[in-house]
Image: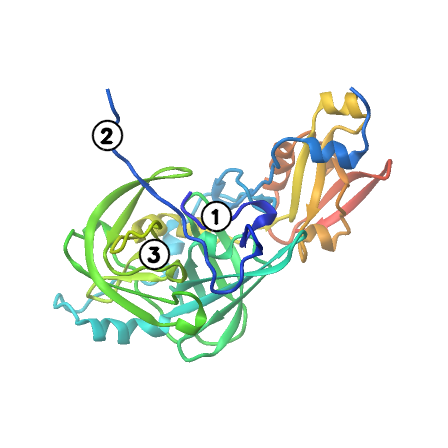
Amino acid sequence: MYREDFSNDNLNENKDGIEKENSIVTTKYTEIKPSKTKKKQGIGKVMAGIAGVLVLSLISGGIGAAVTYNMSASSTKSQTTEANNLYQTLSSTSDKPLVVTEVVKNAENGVVAITAKVKSARTGVGEAAGSGFIFSEEGYILTNYHVIAGSNDIIIQFKDGNTANAKVINFDEELDLAVIKVTDDISMPAVLNLGNSSLVVTGESVVAIGSPLGSEFIGSVTSGIISSAQRQLETETGVHNFLQTNAAINPGNSGGPLLNMKGEVIGINSAKITGGVEGIGFAIPIDTAKEKIGDLLKPIVTLGIEPRDITEEMSKQYDLNVGVYIVRVSNGSAAQEAGLRNGDIIIKADGKKVKTSEALKAALDKHKSGDTMKLTIIRDGEETTVSVQL
């Protein structure tokens, strides 16, 4: 996947601890090239010895399990017509291209700086910084997933310096896409039109707007050309298509718009290649995002736990109940509100046995936001049932 180097409870950290504001890690990309011709132990020790933390993200729209702090439910398939009615598509009144100053004037108020606070049980609170852009009057904002990954609180800043609170609506970790929404009762200063990245040609002029290095640089503008309209790159999740540009794209630009000379968004700036290479930046084609908008607009349903499976073998060896062990409960999550604790073992969901995280996911998939889910747990050797409002 193409995102900053965040994983599990090390989100937004470097080797020295929590990553400070304005210290942002970029992701290295690799271009595709043609191939060449038995003693019992305490529960704490048991869990510490299990290889690999299984952290599920069960997200709306049928996107599979992935590494994150939330266990989430998938929802039904996207309703494309409804999504198309929500965001603004291109509607140019003239084929005459604008100059850079005109593109910036028309778009800059629709670009925001994003500060995402991430709480880690091990190291405290850190911050991630990035950019995003408003694509609907209802306050929906597109950005990169890695900008908001694991966040507990999100603050956005507009070009005029005003700030507002926002929340995560949904995300696609594999594509590095996320939709957040302004939660304050305010009007949006501008809404950007989504263009058509399939019409982009190599050599055409583009403009990138964002907040390199943080909100103090909000509204920074760079310009250049499309160096390649169809660049395939290999990321951690496979091969993906990108727009390649020589417009400077720095870490804090992640999530900001790449605009054509009609002022339409044709890409979502992702990250600049590290290693001292200048003049090479990449953006996710806007058509990729448009295909996912329907799913990303559906609120994600989460428990907010970090789970590990207790298998039959482990159960016999360590005299534990088979089920889903809660390694950590996320702050402010549905699980925390319901009183679930680190160390609880989930053995039933809505009255049915669950032996694995996948089984728990399947039970969660049947619910929507606002539903109540009953979980039977083992705590200190005692069985009890907890009601969780999702």
Q: Please give the residue where the numbered disc 2 appears in the rendered image.
A: 34
Badge 1 vs badge 3, beta-carbon distance below 8 Å = no
Residue 240 image position (x, y, % from top left): 33, 41
What kind of residue is marked 3? Ile
Rendering quarter of residue 43: top right
Q: Residue at x 28, y 61 (%)?
A: 248
**Dot 3 alpha-carbon crowd within 10 angstroms: few under 14, some 14 to 19, many 20 or more:** many
The foreground one among 201 and 76 is 201
234 in relation to 388, above or below: above
In the rendered structure, find residue 268 and report the number of the disc placed on it: 3
Q: Is residue 213 visible?
A: yes
The foreground one among 314 and 46 is 46
What kind of residue is marked 1? Asp
Q: Is residue 138 visible?
A: no
**Dot 2 alpha-carbon crowd within 10 angstroms: few under 14, some 14 to 19, many 20 or more:** few
| Numbered disc in front, either 1 or 3 | 1
Residue 88 image position (x, y, % from top left): 33, 63
Residue 177 image position (x, y, % from top left): 42, 51
Q: Please give the residue where the numbered disc 1 appears in the rendered image.
A: 5
Q: Which label's residue is closer to the chain start, 1 or 3?
A: 1
Badge 2 vs badge 1, beta-carbon distance below 8 Å = no
Quadrant into which the N terminus falls: top left
Disc 1 to disc 3, how far (Cα)?
Answer: 19 Å
Disc 2 to disc 1, how far (Cα)?
Answer: 27 Å
In the rendered structure, find residue 91 and report the number of the disc placed on it: none
Q: Which label's residue is closer to the chain start, 3 or 2?
A: 2
Disc 3 to disc 2, how far (Cα)?
Answer: 27 Å
Q: Residue at x 73, y 24 (%)?
A: 314
Q: Is residue 182 left or right of residue 96?
A: right
Counting the numbered discs, the total is: 3
